[in-house]
Image (cartoon, rainbow, N blue to C red):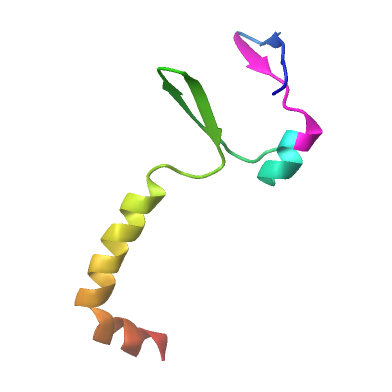
Amino acid sequence: MQKLKLRKVGGSVGVILPKEVLDNLRLSDGDEVFIEANQTGINLSPLDPDFEATMDAFERTRKKYRNAFRELAK
C-alpha cells in the first residue's frame, strides 16, 4: 500500500498514480478509468462497470439472431 498526496489540478483535486500502478493496470496517458466510491473507500478500475450488462444483452441478441449474424459475416 502506498500513500499518495492529493494535489490541486485546475478547479479539481487529483492524485498522481505511480508508474508501477499504471504498468500493473496497463494504463497510460489519455486512457480512461472508472471510479466507484463505497463504504470502505474507492475502487479505481480500467474496466467499464456496464460492460458485463452490455455483453449479457449482446449474448441474448446473438442467440436470437445467430442466423442473420452468420449471413452478415459472409
Say which of 66 and 23 sits in front.
23
Q: Residue at x 28, y 73 (%)?
A: 62
Residue that extends furthest to the front in the rendered view of this protein: 1
The answer to whether 35 appears left or right of 69 in the picture is right
Quadrant in which the N terminus is drawn: top right
Q: x%, y% of residue 42?
A: 50, 23
In reply to whether residue 6 is colored magenta, the answer given is no
The answer to whether 42 appears left or right of 17 in the picture is left
- With respect to residue 24, does 14 lie above or below? above
Say which of 42 and 73 sits in front.
42
The answer to whether 45 appears left or right of 16 in the picture is left
The quarter holding residue 31 reads: top right
Q: x%, y% of residue 47?
A: 51, 45
- With respect to residue 52, does 10 lie above or below? above
Say which of 51 and 2 sits in front.
2
Q: x%, y% of residue 28?
A: 73, 41
- With respect to residue 10, does 71 lie above or below? below
Q: x%, y% of residue 67?
A: 25, 87
Quadrant in which the C terminus is drawn: bottom left
- With respect to residue 21, does 8 lie above or below? above
The quarter holding residue 32 reads: top right
Which stretch is magenta? Answer: 12-20
Determine if residue 28 is in view. Answer: no
Q: Residue at x 40, y 86 (%)?
A: 73
In reply to whether residue 17 is colored magenta, the answer given is yes
Determine if residue 65 is in view. Answer: yes
The answer to whether 14 appears left or right of 33 in the picture is right
